[in-house]
Amino acid sequence: MDESVTAAVETMLLPGADPMAVVAASEHVIAWAHARQLEALNEAAREQPEYLDPTGALVDPAPAEVATTLSWSTGAAARRLDLAAEVCSELPELLDALQTGRLDLPKVQEIALGTCELDPADRVPLVSEAVTYAGRHTRAQLRAWLTRRVAAIDPEAVQRRRKTAERKRRVWLDPERDGMATIGAYLTAEEAQACWNALVAVAANIEGGQDAARADAFVALVTGLDVGQPVPVQVLVTPAGPELVGHGPLSPSHAAELCGGAERIDVTPVPESPGYRPAPGLARWVRTRDRHCRFPGCRRPAVHCDLDHVIPYPAGSTHDGNLATLCRYHHRLKTHTPWRVRMLPDASLEWISPRGKVLRTSLEDP
């Protein structure tokens, strides 16, 4: 451990220490811990054997192992692994700045991302400059500074970066508390501005506060419904409580509002299917029962998941006691890597990681 880290720990434990000194010291220790984590993540990933599916595509179990260790999403784990590989293998000065507490993890991420399109000969000296600059400026200032410096060093890198960013355009949905949710979109600047202008134009004719009016306009434009018209939904009533399909748990009163005048579909278990592919009724039942991917921590809606035979067919038959919904990544993980799973009589799944860690998911998991 670096002497500066030891001194920071001593400051944190010193009775009567100045509160701001403790704040700074704790940030120093957190940065050092993040550096040690990146080193460990890089080491663990490099120890992993390569697993390939029948097409020759790589199936990487490292994100799943990290995600289950830290109770993170697989995507968050994959991003941290990518950062670890880059910082430990290509940008040692960033790792040193983190170890010694000169930079925090968000600024390290900003520098790594902001310089990624440069050739190594240009990137390494700019990273060195950025470490010095970042120590005296906010993350937002650092981002703007990097943008200008990269454009000055390699104008074509800016174009490559923009093309890379365009390929990453996406829209996402995040459940929130109180029966609410957030929809986000990562778009080109011109697309985002055009969408915003359209929202503002429609919202101008809707009564109410500007924020709520824009929200109403957004729903109307995307769904094609009139403002205030109820949207079609699917509410699932389970022993654990009501859920909005694709979202998650709802309060009973909220579910009752949504179900007013609703058509009821009773989904009950159906017999097993004779072949490999589940019959429509069996597939509907398993997706309704599972609600989302059954890997620990994954909440990808069941409608977007594969139906997997826990015991592979034909050794395992096609019935609800041997079927579970898995997203494509976790399906491939189960099939092509040492991860193992078994289904218990109550339909819980018991997962065993390559390192022997046992995790269980149940039907009550939100």
Image (cartoon, rainbow, N blue to C red):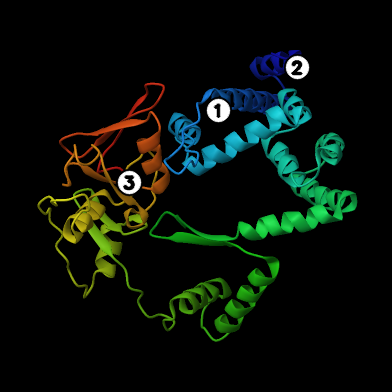
Local crowd at mark 2 within 10 Å, few (<14), some, or many (≥20)? some
Which residue sits furthest left? 271
Which quadrant does the N terminus fall into? top right
Kind of residue at disc 3:
Pro
Q: Position of residue 150 (x, y in %)?
A: 84, 49
Residue in the image at 28% along x and 69% along y: 257
- Which SS class for mark 3? loop
Q: Earlier in the sequence, mark 2 or mark 3?
A: 2
- Residue 327 visible here: yes
307 and 29: which one is in front? 307
- Which SS class for mark 2? helix
Q: Which residue is disc 2 drawn over?
A: 4
In front: label 2 or label 1: 1
Occupied quadrant, residue 127: top right
Spatial CA distance of label 2 from label 1 is 29 Å
Which residue sits furthest bottom? 205
Q: Which residue is disc 1 drawn over?
A: 45
Q: Position of residue 275 (x, y in %)?
A: 17, 50
Kind of residue at disc 2:
Ser
Local crowd at mark 3 within 10 Å, few (<14), some, or many (≥20)? some
- Residue 23 visible here: no
Q: Earlier in the sequence, mark 3 or mark 1?
A: 1
The reply, left or right, for residue 40 in relation to residue 150 is left
In front: label 2 or label 3: 3
| Residue 21 against residue 228 in the figure, above or below | above
The reply, left or right, for residue 58 in relation to residue 188 is left
What numbered label is drawn on residue 366?
Answer: 3
Spatial CA distance of label 2 from label 3 is 43 Å
Which residue sits furthest right? 152
